[in-house]
Image (spheres, rainbow, N blue to C red):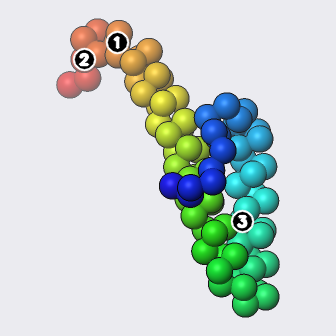
């Protein structure tokens, strides 16, 4: 985790994806310009934002599975 990372859990999904897009562009630009120190910082931030996005997707998946678990014993396919 980047030491100066703000609290990204309060961001909406749209804002989170916008920030990931912006950081990806900045990372690409920093590599093109040869500024590898900036690229390293962008990469650390991008990892944190991607981890938050994955955490949210995992939470949605678990909620969907819990919602559909009521049919586990009802449907029997043989």
Q: Quarter holding the C terminus?
A: top left
Taking the image as drawn, is residue 27 in sight? yes
Label 1 vs 3, first from the N-terminus: 3
- Residue found at the very far left of the displayed protein: 78
Residue 37 place in picture, x, y as percent: 65, 80
**Label 3, on which residue?**
24
Residue 38: name its quadrant.
bottom right
Residue in the picture at 48% in, 30% down:
59
Mark 2 Cα shell of 10 Å, populated few (<14), some (14-19), many (≥20): few
Nearer to us: label 1 or label 3: 3
Secondary structure beneath dot 3 equals helix
Tell me the number on the disc at residue 76. 2
- Residue found at the very far bottom of the displayed protein: 34
- In space, the residues marked 1 and 3 are separated at their CA atoms by 41 Å
Residue in the picture at 62% in, 59% down:
45
Residue in the picture at 47% in, 37% down:
58
Residue in the picture at 50% in, 40% down:
55
Residue 14: name its quadrant.
top right
Mark 1 Cα shell of 10 Å, populated few (<14), some (14-19), many (≥20): few
Residues at circles 1 and 2 in contact by the CB criterion of under 8 Å: no
Residue 77 place in picture, x, y as percent: 26, 23
Taking the image as drawn, is residue 75 in sight? no
Nearer to us: label 3 or label 2: 3
Label 1 vs 2, first from the N-terminus: 1
Q: Nearer the viewer, residue 56 or 5?
A: 5
**Label 1, on which residue?**
71
Rendered position, 3 above or below 58: below
Nearer to us: label 1 or label 2: 1
Q: Nearer the viewer, residue 62 or 72?
A: 62
């Amino acid at each position: 985790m980047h030491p100066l990372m703000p609290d990204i859990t309060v961001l909406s999904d749209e804002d989170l994806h916008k920030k990931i897009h912006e950081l990806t562009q900045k990372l690409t630009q920093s590599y093109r310009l040869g500024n590898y120190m900036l690229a390293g910082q962008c990469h650390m931030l991008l990892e944190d934002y991607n981890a938050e996005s994955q955490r949210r997707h995992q939470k949605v998946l678990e909620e969907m599975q819990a919602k559909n678990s009521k049919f586990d014993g009802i449907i029997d396919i043989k």
